[in-house]
Structures are given as structure tokens and as C-alpha cells.
Image: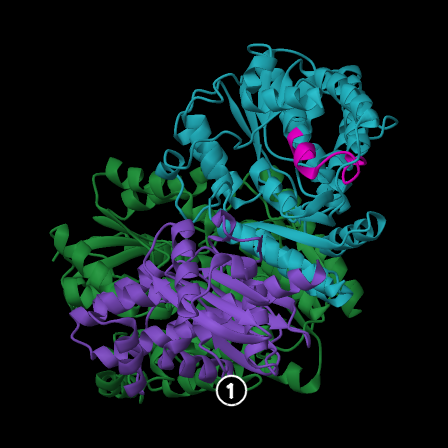
């Protein structure tokens, strides 16, 4: 598949504008999706090749009209990010790239387009089945070894295939993973842009988070210097207030997911995680979370309204994002409800808004609690304790742990994870698929492994 | 040279040369040995030399992890590091960070372990952070052994280690003339295990012997770069096909000895500056350009014909670094070979083919 | 003077005799595990064809994975240099050689003298080599040549993992279980093999003209997919592409004799 310059971000922009328009009439949209599901859902065909993943991203016809109405806000926020990016590409105004664990608020306080190259991976999925593969292949053709995380390789591929405008500056992080670090070094080399590296904290203790937040202040100074602009502290404060509210709803949805039966909104939380990376501080993603929160509340108050009976409860780590409908497929085929996944699970602490310093510490800590970073930073106990907590809090019946090929720290923990599950007397499945590269394990093979696992353990 | 045989014996059985209960393990280059030595212990660099495989290590790690920590863990599980009184691990990379976790989880009988967090850049903020982390390590050692690491003790250790590094620099300068790169690697492995005073004595002896030694056969002049290279057999392949390793840019080489610690400053600050701001390994960000510049300078200084870039399979950091190096060497028209391997991982004939073909290519280009 | 080149590969052993810059005899045998015994056998075979004796040969050069163990060889050269020299001998317009052997694949660039000036070789993983094609063909119940022939017939392909041979095999088995068409699976395999090679090709600059050597060069479907994916046109060699290593070795045997 050959990509035209900016093809992917253009498509994500138009797709999100379209979603925002169509979902204004959520019930009609629901019927439309339902009608097209026969062509779009189960299997890839020539007809649905370029739109199938986009279709899945908007709920694969499984979402209720209420959920579509909520998702409209996510689409709106997403269209803003990509619209601004396209404009910046057109007018050649500055774009700041930032590594996904960097709080985006420190860039959005400037009047520039802020862009998280890693979030491009999701966009690449939406553009079509092979959007991300085209990027991966471009990286392979450039001779870069495939032993780093596919998300990072897609990011590099995006640059190689001219999908993202050149950066005026890059803000990178040194932790939580080697792949991110090495990717930033490659991108800095390829683009020649000035770069600043933040030493992300290895622990969540105050002393380390304080040092991390000092790095964020330094990054702002660095950007002021490069962009010749002043940071807008008032805007920053507004975004932190929105973030607090946003986090409140996400935390509440997570807590409600613990209910038996669960509202089964882990998928929505995952989607919220995806949109929070490039859109944190946007009032619309908060609105999305608020509406999902209302749906969760309603579901708990009226469990009889749930269309499927909950037979068993699952915790999922790193389910391939490229096969996004899998949560719902599991639910429909086996009655298994994904009650929590590593990415969406939200336990964000409230940010103290009394001073700039406390707010900066707050956003720093917030990202340490974001899915993936939450588990990947520091010692193994960060992952293992979190898993133990989730198993207990969500009354899980099984754990599905995906390999995530390029995630080296995670792959070093397989024994510990298995033992945690054994201690809790629940079965676990260790899979070798890749969260971001569909070529590693096919969708069919993945579904077969899941089916076998559920059957062997008496869930199906 | 008879002294080389002594170094070989150290590698085969390090505990014989160490006082019982007086050794603390460490890995890797950003753990200041001086702090361990100042507490009255011999810092012993963990390595996978003489490891028997990865099967025990693989019970904890996955096969998608680097062969180095898998082998070191395997060695630990075999009891080969039973003589250590404690270990200071560090967050060198994701694999090695998890070596600390798996070492503890596997309940290897080491009295204590510690994970030192080292920042990933050379900025002032990072330096302060590193000083802070070193202070935490000092507090940890002091509380375990109920002792005080006085400034004077640390200074004495700095002096001794500076002498060792200077001696290693001296020995290194004989590479390609009177000493093979393979033998130098052996010296490096042995001297990062031996008590520093004994290491210095032996290095003194080696220098005397080298002065009287005959010249080695002239061959292609090769520089080896990468991160974790400790297999003597691998260096033998590189040299036996027709090359001399005249310089290196690896952790068990110039990155270890090309480091000066100031005697003027407050010792912990001096250590932090010396360790963080000396030639870095790819874990340090925003420093790639300098690292490559350093290699380019060495290529000129040591009249290097070709560069071998060593990468261990699954090493994310060398993926980026190796690729950037390749681009730069191509621009400079410096012949290079990017070699991916597993530590003691076999595939000898394929590696030999690549190296031989590479030398044939370099000769064709001359 | 007659010069001999012997190429001990992982699946087959080849020998070539060179006289006055002409190939006067060739031999190819398969299925012997010991490199030394293979060399003896293929050497005898190539001599026998022209009724020659060992002492008629001025210099023997060995190449291939078993080159170090061959007692009858006077010198040895890497198979990379030999494939480069062999292909250049066969067609002097060649500048890039894609060699897909039993256990490895390499891409070799040669200069206007036929000397290697750049190359890349796959890592230890077998995916994209002749061996992996053999495993996949076996899984489908076909021979390698049948796999190539069947894949040629299909314009559609099914996804097959490019990660490693084990993953590839699992995908092929899964497709079989699902009752998919063999031709589409076979095409998936050849496309994945070509993709692996394209991945390798990214590490250096391919120069025209380009040819394929090694056993897999006889697989038409892989050749077609390589051309499609890498967007290039392959140039034909004037000799059996499987003999390039041995031809190159014979050239080095001749060069050695000339130099000394």
C-alpha cells in the first residue's frame, strides 16, 4: 500500500468530522451502523478493506445510541487536533511533537499545533487495514530492526511516508521504555529538530514526581526559547481543571465497571485513554467521559437493560488495538465481559490546583497513572501490584495477557504474571500477538486462541 | 605472556581471588564502584562468562528478552554468584531493570539487592537527580553495614580506581601492536572482578611484559562498538579471520576506562559528574551525535580500516543507535558491519561468514 | 590450468571447473550432512564428468557454510564474495545479487570488477529462506517447486505472519483448518518470503542490474513477488543460478593462482 503525503491524518480528520456530524442524530447513526455491520464486522473483504477498522473504532455497531452520542465529543476533540495539524502543515506554522507520556498540557499552553506521533498509530488503523502496515514496511525498508515496539515503528514510518508535518521541536521522555527512547533518538536524527528529554519518574513518590515536574518546567523554558513565545499559564490552569473533572468521570466509570454484573465499559475506557493522549484538557473529551459515566450509572441502576448476560469476567492486558472489536466479540460469542484492561483502567489522583508547582506535579503524576506507563515504569511491583489490585477489585475470572512483542520489560514479567493468577486461582492466557502489528498474529488465529482458552477453562 | 594466563584464571573462577563475604556485585557502567569499595568491599561486575545457558533464566524471562540478563540470571540460579554479599543493579535498559526484579523473585540467595535509578541525560537536572540517587545508595550501604562512608574513604577509592583506569588506558594503547583485542577483553573482564589493588598490580606486571613482547601480526585494523560484548570467543572470531581490534567503544572497554573523576570536588558530586558526563552508552539521550563523533575521532586516531557495530538481539537501544551509526558511517565512507547476535548464542558459521565477507569487502575497497 | 570451486551449502553441494575462463564441468549433489564428505563426493563427481584427476586441478577454493572443514581446498572465501563474483561472471551487467539459500539470504552489491562492495545477510531467523519455504510446503503437503507453481496461479493471497517460521507455519495450519484454498495460502507464503527479503533489501542501496541466485531463485512465485514488492526487474543469469557460489569460488581459485 502506497501512502500519499498526509493521507492518514486527512482521513482521520474527515472521519472525525463525519462522525461528529452523523452522531448528532445518534439513533439514526445507530441504525446506519447496524445496517452496514453485515458488511463490515466479521471479515475483511475488498469492499470494507479501508474502512473496517474505522468502523470498529466507532463501536462496530455494538455501541448503543447513547454511547454514540458520547463518542461524538471524542470525535470533535480529535477533529480539532488533526484539523490544526493539517492547517499547520499547509501554512508551515510550528508543530511540536511530544512523546506520549509527556503531559500535552505543557505544549498546548503555547499557540502551536501539539502532536503526539504515537497517537498516529490509531489514526493509521482507521485509515484502513494496511495503513499501519504501510508505515511498518517503510521502516523495514529503511533498514531499522524490528525488535522495537510496533507503535514506535509506526511513528517512524509516519515520518518516512510523509504523514506528519516536520517538528519545530521534540519533547521526549527517557522512561518508561527503551523503545520510546531509541525511537526519539531516531526521530531527532531524521528530522534534525531540537529536542528536550524529560526524565520521567521511576517511582510515584513525591520526591521523584517533584523532580519529574521540574523537568516539565524546564521543557516549557526550552519551548519558550525555541518558539519565541510565552507559555499561557491561564490556559494551563483551565486545562488542569478540566483534567480533574475528566479524571473524576474516568475513575468513576472504572469503579462502576467493578460492579457485578459490570456495565462492560472497558472498551469505552480504552477509547478514552486513546483520546486523552492527544486531547487532554479538551472540554469535549471530558463531556464524552461524563456521558459514559451517566450510561454506566444507568446500567448499574437497571442491570436488566443489559442486552447480554454476564457469564464471566475478564481482565485484558494489551489486547491488539488493531483488532479493536475483540472485547465485544468476546462478549457476544461467550458472554465474557472485559471488566478492565491495562490501558483504560483509571485511578487518577486528584490534582491540587493551589499553585503552578502543585499543578505541574499533578499533571506529572497523572501521566504516571496513565495505562501502560502506570505498569511499565520502575520496578516490577508497579505491574504486579496493579494486576493484583485489578483481579481483586474487578472480581476477575481470568486474565488474558498479550505478549506485545516489542515491550521488553513486560515480556520479562511473564512468570510473575502467571504466578499472580495462579495465586488467585484464576486461569491466565499468555498470547504472542502484537498490540500494534496485525501481521504478527492474524485475527483468526487470535480468535481461535481465545476460543480454545475459554473452552478449556469451562467458560464456553 | 604468563600474566595473561593469570587473568584467564580469574575469569574462570573469580571467587578464588576474592575474600569471602567481602564482595558486592554490580551492573553496569553507571554504578560507581568507588562507593562499594569505600565501604570495604570489592565491587564485582556481573557478567555471563562461563554461564551454562538460559534454561533456568527462561523460567522467569521470555525468549523475547536479551540473552545477557537471561544468562546472568541463569548463572545466579546456578549458585555461581553465591559468594556475593549484595548486588547493586541499575536501570541500564528494560531487560536489565527486570533482572533486578527477577533476581529477587527467583529468591536467589543474595543477602541484599538494590536498584539504582540513573537518569538518562546529561543535563544539570539529571546530574542533581543522579547525585540524589547516589546519596540514597550510600545511605543504603551505610544502614546495612552500620558504617559511615566518609569523604576521605570515598576519595581514597576514587584515587585507586583512577589509577586502575589509567593503567587500563595504558594497556589499551598496546592493542594492535603487541596485544590482541581478544586478550584485552580478557583483561577487562578480569580487572572488573578483581580487587582494584590486585588488579593494578597485575596491570603493572602486564605493562612490563608488553614492553618486552614481540609485535603481533599486522592485519586489518578494526574498531568494535556496541554495548554488551564480553564473549572472548567472539573476539577471537573477529581477529582470527584477519583483523586486529585496535580500539573499542563498548562498556567493557573504553567506556569503562575513558573516565576521569576529579579529586578537587566534593567526592559524591565528582563521582556523579565523572560517571554521568564521561563517554556515554546509548541509554543516555541527546548524546548520540557526541558518541558517534567519538568513534569517528578514534577511527582517525587509530587508523581504523573498518568498524564492527555489535548489537544483541532484542536490544532496543542499539536498534536506534546502530541505525544512526550506519547512516553516519555510510556518509563518511567508513566501512562498517552491523552484527546482530545472541550472547554466546551459536550461529558461529553465519557470524564468521559475515565477518569474513566484510573483510573481503574492505580489502576490495582499499 | 584448471581451477575448481566447491560450494558446500546446507542442502546441496556444488562444484565447478574453470578452464581458460570457461566452465568445463559442473556437479550438484544433495543430502549429505558432513561438509568434508560432501566436498569429496562433489569434487569426484565434477572431475569424473571430464575424466580428470585431482592432480589436474591447479587450485581448489571452497565456499559455503562448510568451507573451513574441507581438506582438499587450498583456500576458502566467504559465500558472499563467491556469489558476487559468480553472478558477475555469468552476466557482467549484474551489480546486485539477491541470494536466497537454504539457511540464509543475502543481498550483495558488486562493483564493476565483480568485487563485493556492500552486502547484508539475514539474522539467525530462518523466515524468508529456502528452509522456511520447505517447511511451509511440507505443511501444505507439497514440494517446494509445487508450492511455487501453485502460488503462481493465484492472484489472491491470505495473510501469513512475517515474524518467524514458527508463526508462519501456525498461520498456514490455521488457514488449512479453515478450509482456505491452497493456492491462496501458497501465495501468502511467497509474498511473506518476498517481504522478508524486501526488509533486508532496505538496509542497502540496490543497484541495477539485479539478479537472484541460490535454490529459491528457481521458485517463480517468489521471484515474481520480489519484483512486485521491491518494484524492480530481475535480470537473467547465463548459468544455473544455484551454481553461482561454486563459480565464484573457482574464480577466486584462479585469481589466487594468478597472484601467486
Left or right, B244 with respect to B58, comes to right
Q: What chain does mark 1 sit on? A: C
Q: Look at the image and tell me whether residue B75 can be seen.
A: yes
Q: Which residues are magenta?
A: B172-186
Disc 1 target residue: C233
**In which quadrant of the rendered image does the C terminus of chain C lie?**
bottom right
**In which quadrant of the rendered image does the N terminus of chain C lie?**
bottom right
Residue A402 x/y as whole percent: 34, 55
Residue C27 placement: quadrant: bottom left
Q: From the rendered image, report the letter of the chain displayed in cyan.
A: B
Residue A394 magenta-drawn?
no
- From the viewer's side, name the closer residue of A139 and A143: A143
Residue C216 placement: quadrant: bottom left
Q: From the rendered image, report the letter of the chain displayed in purple.
A: C
Residue B181 magenta-drawn?
yes
Question: What color is chain A drawn in?
Answer: green
Q: Looking at the image, is C50 positioned above or below residue A175?
A: below
Q: Looking at the image, is B366 positioned above or below residue B164?
A: below
What residue lies at 46% left-to-right and 35% top-to-bottom?
B71
Left or right, C28 with respect to A398, comes to right
- From the viewer's side, name the closer residue of A382 and A230: A382
SS at circle 1: loop
What residue lies at 66% left-to-right and 87% top-to-bottom?
A90
Residue A378 x/y as whole percent: 52, 41
What residue lies at 85% left-to-right and 48% top-to-bottom?
B301
- From the viewer's side, name the closer residue of B324 and C59: C59
Q: Looking at the image, is A365 positioned above or below residue A101?
A: above
Residue A115 placement: quadrant: bottom right
Residue B277 x/y as whole percent: 77, 41
Q: Look at the image and tell me whether residue C163 can be seen.
A: no
Residue A30 x/y as whole percent: 27, 83
Amino acid at each position: 500500500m502506497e501512502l500519499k503525503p498526509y493521507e492518514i491524518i486527512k482521513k482521520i480528520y474527515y472521519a472525525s468530522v463525519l462522525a461528529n456530524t452523523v452522531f448528532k442524530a445518534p439513533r439514526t447513526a445507530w441504525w446506519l451502523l447496524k445496517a452496514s455491520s453485515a458488511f463490515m464486522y466479521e471479515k475483511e473483504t475488498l469492499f470494507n478493506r479501508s474502512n473496517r477498522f474505522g468502523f470498529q473504532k466507532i463501536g462496530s455497531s455494538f455501541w448503543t445510541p447513547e454511547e454514540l452520542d458520547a463518542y461524538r465529543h471524542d470525535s470533535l476533540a480529535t477533529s480539532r487536533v488533526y484539523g490544526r495539524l493539517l492547517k499547520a502543515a499547509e501554512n508551515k506554522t510550528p508543530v511540536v511533537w511530544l512523546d506520549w507520556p509527556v503531559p500535552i498540557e505543557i505544549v498546548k499552553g503555547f499557540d502551536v499545533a501539539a502532536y503526539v506521533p504515537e497517537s498516529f498509530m490509531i489514526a493509521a488503523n482507521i485509515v484502513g487495514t494496511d495503513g499501519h502496515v504501510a508505515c511498518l514496511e517503510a521502516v523495514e525498508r529503511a533498514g531499522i530492526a524490528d525488535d522495537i515496539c510496533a507503535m514506535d515503528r509506526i511513528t517512524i514510518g509516519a515520518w518516512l511516508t510523509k504523514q506528519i508535518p516536520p517538528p519545530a521541536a521534540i519533547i521526549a521522555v527517557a522512561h518508561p521504555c527503551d523503545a520510546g527512547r531509541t525511537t526519539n533518538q531516531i526521530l531527532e536524527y531524521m528530522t534534525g529538530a531540537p529536542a528536550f528529554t524529560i526524565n520521567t519518574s521511576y517511582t510515584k513518590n513525591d520526591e521523584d514526581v517533584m523532580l519529574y515536574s521540574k523537568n516539565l518546567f524546564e521543557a516549557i523554558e526550552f519551548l519558550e526559547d525555541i518558539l519565541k513565545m510565552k507559555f499561557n499559564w491561564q490556559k494551563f490552569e483551565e486545562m488542569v481543571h478540566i483534567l480533574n473533572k475528566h479524571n473524576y468521570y474516568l475513575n468513576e466509570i472504572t469503579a462502576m465497571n467493578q460492579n457485578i454484573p459490570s456495565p462492560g465499559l472497558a472498551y469505552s475506557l480504552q477509547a478514552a485513554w486513546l483520546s486523552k493522549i492527544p486531547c487532554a484538557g479538551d472540554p469535549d473529551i471530558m463531556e464524552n467521559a461524563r456521558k459514559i459515566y451517566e450510561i454506566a450509572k444507568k446500567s448499574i441502576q437497571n442491570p436488566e437493560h443489559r442486552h447480554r448476560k454476564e457469564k464471566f469476567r475478564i481482565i485484558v492486558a494489551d489486547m491488539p488495538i488493531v483488532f479493536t472489536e475483540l472485547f465485544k466479540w468476546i462478549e457476544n460469542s461467550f458472554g465474557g465481559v472485559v471488566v478492565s484492561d491495562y490501558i483504560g483502567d483509571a485511578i487518577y489522583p486528584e490534582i491540587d490546583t493551589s499553585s503552578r508547582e502543585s499543578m505541574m506535579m499533578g499533571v506529572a503524576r497523572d501521566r504516571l497513572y496513565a495505562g501502560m506507563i502506570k505498569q511499565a515504569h520502575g520496578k516490577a511491583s508497579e505491574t504486579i501490584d496493579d494486576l493484583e489490585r485489578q483481579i481483586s477489585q474487578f472480581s476477575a475470572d481470568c486474565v488474558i495477557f498479550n505478549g506485545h512483542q516489542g515491550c521488553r520489560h513486560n515480556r520479562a514479567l511473564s512468570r510473575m504474571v502467571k504466578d499472580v493468577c495462579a495465586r488467585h486461582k484464576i486461569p491466565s492466557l499468555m498470547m504472542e500477538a502484537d498490540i500494534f502489528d496485525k501481521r504478527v498474529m492474524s485475527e483468526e488465529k487470535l480468535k481461535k486462541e481465545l476460543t480454545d482458552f475459554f473452552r478449556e477453562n469451562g467458560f464456553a | 605472556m604468563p600474566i595473561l594466563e593469570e587473568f584467564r584464571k580469574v575469569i574462570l573462577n573469580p571467587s578464588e581471588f576474592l575474600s569471602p563475604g567481602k564482595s558486592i556485585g554490580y551492573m553496569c557502567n553507571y554504578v560507581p564502584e568507588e562507593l562499594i569499595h569505600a565501604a570495604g568491599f570489592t565491587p564485582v561486575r556481573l557478567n555471563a562468562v562461563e554461564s551454562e545457558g538460559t534454561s533456568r533464566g527462561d523460567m522467569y524471562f521470555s525468549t523475547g528478552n536479551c540473552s545477557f540478563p537471561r544468562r546472568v540470571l541463569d548463572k545466579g540460579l546456578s549458585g555461581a554468584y553465591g559468594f556475593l554479599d549484595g548486588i547493586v543493579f541499575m536501570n541500564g535498559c528494560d531487560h536489565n531493570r527486570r533482572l533486578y526484579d527477577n533476581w529477587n523473585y527467583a529468591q536467589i540467595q543474595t543477602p541484599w539487592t538494590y536498584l539504582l535509578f540513573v537518569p538518562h541525560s546529561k543535563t544539570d537536572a539529571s546530574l542533581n537527580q543522579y547525585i540524589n540517587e547516589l546519596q540514597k545508595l550510600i545511605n543504603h550501604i551505610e544502614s546495612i553495614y552500620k558504617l559511615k562512608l566518609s569523604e576521605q574513604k570515598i576519595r581514597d577509592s576514587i584515587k585507586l580506581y583512577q589509577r586502575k583506569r589509567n593503567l587500563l588506558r595504558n594497556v589499551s594503547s598496546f592493542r594492535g601492536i603487541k596485544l590482541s583485542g581478544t586478550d584485552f577483553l580478557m583483561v577487562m573482564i578480569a580487572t572488573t572482578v578483581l580487587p582494584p589493588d590486585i588488579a593494578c598490580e597485575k596491570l603493572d606486571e602486564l605493562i612490563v611484559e608488553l614492553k618486552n613482547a614481540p609485535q603481533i601480526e599486522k592485519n586489518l585494523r578494526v574498531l568494535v562498538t556496541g554495548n554488551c560484548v564480553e564473549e572472548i570467543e567472539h573476539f577471537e572470531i573477529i581477529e582470527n579471520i584477519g583483523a586486529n581490534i585496535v580500539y573499542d567503544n563498548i562498556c567493557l572497554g573504553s567506556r569503562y576506562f575513558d573516565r576521569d573523576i576529579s579529586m578537587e570536588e566534593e567526592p559524591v558530586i565528582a563521582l556523579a559528574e565523572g560517571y554521568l558526563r564521561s563517554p556515554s552508552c546509548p541509554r543516555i539521550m541527546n548524546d548520540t551525535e557526541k558518541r558517534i563523533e567519538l568513534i569517528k575521532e578514534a577511527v582517525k586516531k587509530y587508523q581504523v580500516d573498518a568498524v564492527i557495530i555489535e548489537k544483541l538481539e532484542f536490544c532496543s537501544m542499539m536498534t536506534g543507535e546502530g541505525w544512526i551509526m550506519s547512516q553516519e558511517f555510510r556518509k563518511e565512507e567508513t566501512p562498517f558491519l552491523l552484527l546482530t547476535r545472541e550472547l554466546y548464542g551459536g550461529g558461529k558459521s553465519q557470524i564468521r561468514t559475515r565477518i569474513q565477507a566484510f573483510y573481503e569487502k574492505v580489502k576490495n575497497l582499499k | 590450468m584448471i581451477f575448481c570451486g566447491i560450494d558446500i551449502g546446507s542442502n546441496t553441494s556444488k562444484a565447478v571447473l574453470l578452464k581458460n575462463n570457461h566452465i568445463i564441468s559442473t556437479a550438484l549433489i544433495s543430502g549429505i550432512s558432513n561438509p568434508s564428505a560432501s566436498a569429496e563426493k562433489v569434487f569426484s563427481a565434477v572431475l569424473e564428468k571430464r575424466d580428470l584427476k585431482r592432480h589436474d586441478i591447479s587450485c581448489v577454493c571452497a565456499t559455503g557454510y562448510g568451507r573451513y572443514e574441507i581438506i582438499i581446498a587450498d583456500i576458502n572465501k566467504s559465500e558472499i564474495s563467491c556469489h558476487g563474483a559468480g553472478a558477475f561472471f555469468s552476466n557482467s551487467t549484474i551489480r546486485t545479487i539477491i541470494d536466497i539459500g537454504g539457511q540464509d539470504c543475502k543481498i550483495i552489491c558488486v562493483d564493476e570488477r565483480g568485487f563485493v562492495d556492500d552486502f547484508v545477510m539475514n539474522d539467525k531467523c530462518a523466515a524468508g529462506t529456502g528452509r522456511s519455504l520447505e517447511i511451509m510446503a511440507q505443511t501444505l503437503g507439497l514440494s517446494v517447486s509445487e508450492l511455487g507453481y501453485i502460488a503462481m496461479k493465484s492472484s489472491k493471497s491470505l495473510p501469513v505472519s512475517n515474524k518467524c517460521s514458527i508463526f508462519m507455519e501456525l498461520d498456514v495450519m490455521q488457514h488449512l483448518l479453515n478450509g482456505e484454498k491452497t493456492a491462496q495460502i501458497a501465495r501468502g507464503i511467497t509474498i511473506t518470503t518476498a517481504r522478508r527479503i524486501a526488509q533486508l533489501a532496505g538496509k542497502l542501496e540496490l543497484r541495477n542490474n539485479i539478479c537472484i541466485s541460490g535454490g529459491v531463485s528457481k521458485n517463480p512465485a517468489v521471484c515474481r513477488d520480489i519484483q512486485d514488492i521491491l518494484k524492480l526487474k530481475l535480470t537473467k543469469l547465463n548459468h544455473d543460478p544455484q551454481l553461482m557460489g561454486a563459480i565464484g569460488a573457482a574464480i577466486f581459485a584462479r585469481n589466487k593462482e594468478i597472484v601467486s
